[in-house]
């Protein structure tokens, strides 16, 4: 897979190194030449000097041949411009954008070419809530302009799902349990798996199904 990353800061470099180790073809764009000189020898990663907000730069790099663009700069305005250019001008199939200021989250949608937005502050807040919220539905991440969400709930002792198989739960037609963490181990969530109190259940669902998920896993 060919992956372009805009921004050679700590986030962009960490993503690039991880993807390169997994065998992907990674190119990082960085406009600060000192940063390019610093990171120019990352194993398996090509670091190109230039501003990813400039159409000519992206065209010269052949962005139309890439599978994914990750707009990972520390500036939300730049990330939006990069996302829009990647999707509209080069038809990059998958555009992922970093949200630095959670107040700008509402902008990061398909109108700006963003397929998936990742807000570090929002994610950290969710993880804090998740650590203390047994028996509460916590939204970990949002996809598709808010139409799909990744929810997490730790089943409390009184959960109506305790002792039930997944196939017995009414989570909504378009919702699915995608992971179960039990005693530190991941359990594959097929229909016959029985849920137990203390399980951490991760559900991918439309926002409209949140009430059904709450009723099935938490109760009234």
Image (cartoon, rainbow, N blue to C red):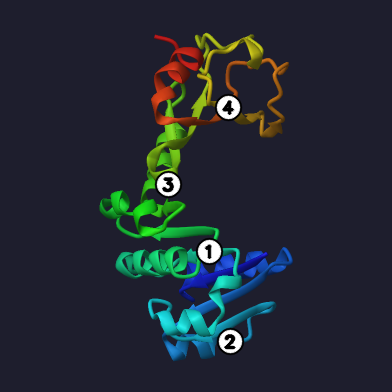
Which label lies toward us, 1 or 2? 1
> Which SS class for mark 3?
helix
Question: Which numbered circle lies on residue 92?
Answer: 1
Q: Earlier in the sequence, mark 4 or mark 2?
A: 2
Q: Earlier in the sequence, mark 3 or mark 4?
A: 3
Q: From the viewer's perspective, is 90 left or right of 80?
A: right
Image quarter in which the C terminus is found? top left
CA distance for labels 3 and 2: 30 Å
Sequence-wise, the earlier of marks 1 and 3 is: 1
The secondary structure type at the circle numbered 4 is strand
Confirm or deny contact between disc 1 and disc 3 (CB under 8 A): no
**Quarter assignment of residue 211:** top left
As displayed, is residue 186 above or below residue 210?
below
* Label placed on residue 47: none
Label 3 Cα neighbours within 10 Å, binned few <14 / some 14-19 / many ≥20? some
Residue bearing mark 2: 40
């Amino acid at each position: 897979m060919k992956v372009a990353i805009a921004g050679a800061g700590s986030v962009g470099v960490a993503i690039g190194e991880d993807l390169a180790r997994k065998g992907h073809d990674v190119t990082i764009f960085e406009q600060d030449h000192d940063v390019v000189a610093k990171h120019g020898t990352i194993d398996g990663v090509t670091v190109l000097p230039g501003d990813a907000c400039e159409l000519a730069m992206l065209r010269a790099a052949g962005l139309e041949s890439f599978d994914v663009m990750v707009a990972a700069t520390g500036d939300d305005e730049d990330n939006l411009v990069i996302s829009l250019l990647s999707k509209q001008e080069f038809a990059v199939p998958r555009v992922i954008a970093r949200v630095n200021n959670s107040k700008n989250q509402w902008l990061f949608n398909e109108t700006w070419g963003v397929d998936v937005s990742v807000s570090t502050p929002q994610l950290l807040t969710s993880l804090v809530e998740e650590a203390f919220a047994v028996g509460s539905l916590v939204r970990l991440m949002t996809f598709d302009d808010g139409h799909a969400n990744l929810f997490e709930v730790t089943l409390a002792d009184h959960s109506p799902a305790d002792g039930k198989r997944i196939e017995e739960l009414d989570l909504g037609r378009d919702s699915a349990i995608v992971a179960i963490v039990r005693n530190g181990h991941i359990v594959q969530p097929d229909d016959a798996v029985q849920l137990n109190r203390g399980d951490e259940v991760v559900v991918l669902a439309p926002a409209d199904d949140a009430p059904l998920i709450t009723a099935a896993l938490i109760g009234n």
